[in-house]
Image (cartoon, rainbow, N blue to C red):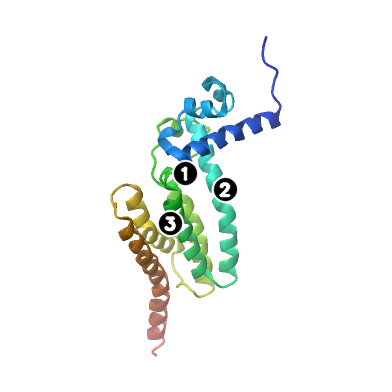
């Protein structure tokens, strides 16, 4: 006898349960634990049942990434308001600190979002739309830099290039540590502090350089 057809809300609820289980596995054990069987076991269903709600493991991964980004977007909206109120520098500090704190407090999640290569199926299935974490972070940083340029905190120029350079400088120690290339946590912490300062000096230094150029062109 065939199973009764599920409602849209029932399907949505089950998808959330699956993502909750994947979220817990990721937080506790890392991306390597995100197998269909492990997720199904945590949900309490057969692994074949999961394919009723997701076409492949890669689609679960992408949905989990999208959920993580949605959480981050709530945080970023407040940063945009802070930047528009005249404190783009402070907003950039918070954006970078958010990434750094994720790396420290939730290393598995950070590695999953920024470093993990999950598998080829996530790139081949048409329903999977993974976007690189750096691309997403860059979009947020670019908007903050644009606002900062408009209110005079940062020099006019190519906002995307400036944002990419600033973010790359600031989170490099976190990426090095997460990838295992920098094992000394004390050194990482000091590097993060210096990298943030250097990142902000880069953005603000551009403003100073632009002012000097303007004064020189005016003959002052």
Q: Is residue 179 visible?
A: yes
Residue identified by numbered label 3 = 100
Per the image, label 3 sits on a secondary structure element best described as helix
Q: Position of residue 148 (x, y in %)?
A: 51, 69
Per the image, label 1 sits on a secondary structure element best described as loop
**Is 7 situated left or right of 114 in this image?**
right
Residue drawn at the location 44% of the way across and 68% of the way down: 157
Quadrant where the N terminus sits is top right
Q: Position of residue 154 (x, y in %)?
A: 46, 72
Marks 2/3: CA–CA distance: 18 Å
Estimate how packed mark 1 is, as few (under 14), some (14 to 19) or many (20 or more) residues with alpha carbons within 10 Å. few
Q: Earlier in the sequence, mark 2 or mark 3?
A: 2
Q: Earlier in the sequence, mark 2 or mark 1?
A: 2
Q: Position of residue 131 (x, y in %)?
A: 47, 44
Estimate how packed mark 3 is, as few (under 14), some (14 to 19) or many (20 or more) residues with alpha carbons within 10 Å. many
Q: Position of residue 219 (x, y in %)?
A: 38, 89
Residue drawn at the location 56% of the way across and 73% of the way down: 86
Residue identified by numbered label 1 = 131
Cβ–Cβ under 8 Å for marks 3 and 1: no
Look at discs 2 and 3 and give the one toward the viewer: 3
Look at discs 3 and 1 and give the one toward the viewer: 3
Q: Earlier in the sequence, mark 3 or mark 1?
A: 3
Quadrant where the C terminus sits is bottom left
Residue identified by numbered label 2 = 70
Estimate how packed mark 2 is, as few (under 14), some (14 to 19) or many (20 or more) residues with alpha carbons within 10 Å. few
Q: Quadrant of residue 124?
A: top left
Look at discs 2 and 1 and give the one toward the viewer: 2
Number of numbered discs: 3
Residue drawn at the location 39% of the way across and 41% of the way down: 116
């Amino acid at each position: 006898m065939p199973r009764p057809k599920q409602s849209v809300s029932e399907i949505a609820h089950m998808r959330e349960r699956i993502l909750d289980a994947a979220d817990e596995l990721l937080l506790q054990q890392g991306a390597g634990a995100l197998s269909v069987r492990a997720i199904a076991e945590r949900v309490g269903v057969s692994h074949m049942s999961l394919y009723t709600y997701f076409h492949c493991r890669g689609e679960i991964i992408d949905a989990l990434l999208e959920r993580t980004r949605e959480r981050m977007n709530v945080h970023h909206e407040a940063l945009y308001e802070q930047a528009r109120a005249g404190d783009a520098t402070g907003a950039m500090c918070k954006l970078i600190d958010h990434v750094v704190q994720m790396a420290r407090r939730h290393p598995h999640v950070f590695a999953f979002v920024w470093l993990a290569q999950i598998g080829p199926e996530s790139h081949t299935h048409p329903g999977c739309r993974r976007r690189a974490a750096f691309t997403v972070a860059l979009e947020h940083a670019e908007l903050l830099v644009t606002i900062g340029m408009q209110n005079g905190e940062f020099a006019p120029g190519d906002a995307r290039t400036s944002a990419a350079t600033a973010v790359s400088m600031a989170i490099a120690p976190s990426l090095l540590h997460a990838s295992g290339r920098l094992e000394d946590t004390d050194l990482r912490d000091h590097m993060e502090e210096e990298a943030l300062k250097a990142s902000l000096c880069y953005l603000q230094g551009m403003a100073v350089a632009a002012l000097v150029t303007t004064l020189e062109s005016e003959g002052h």
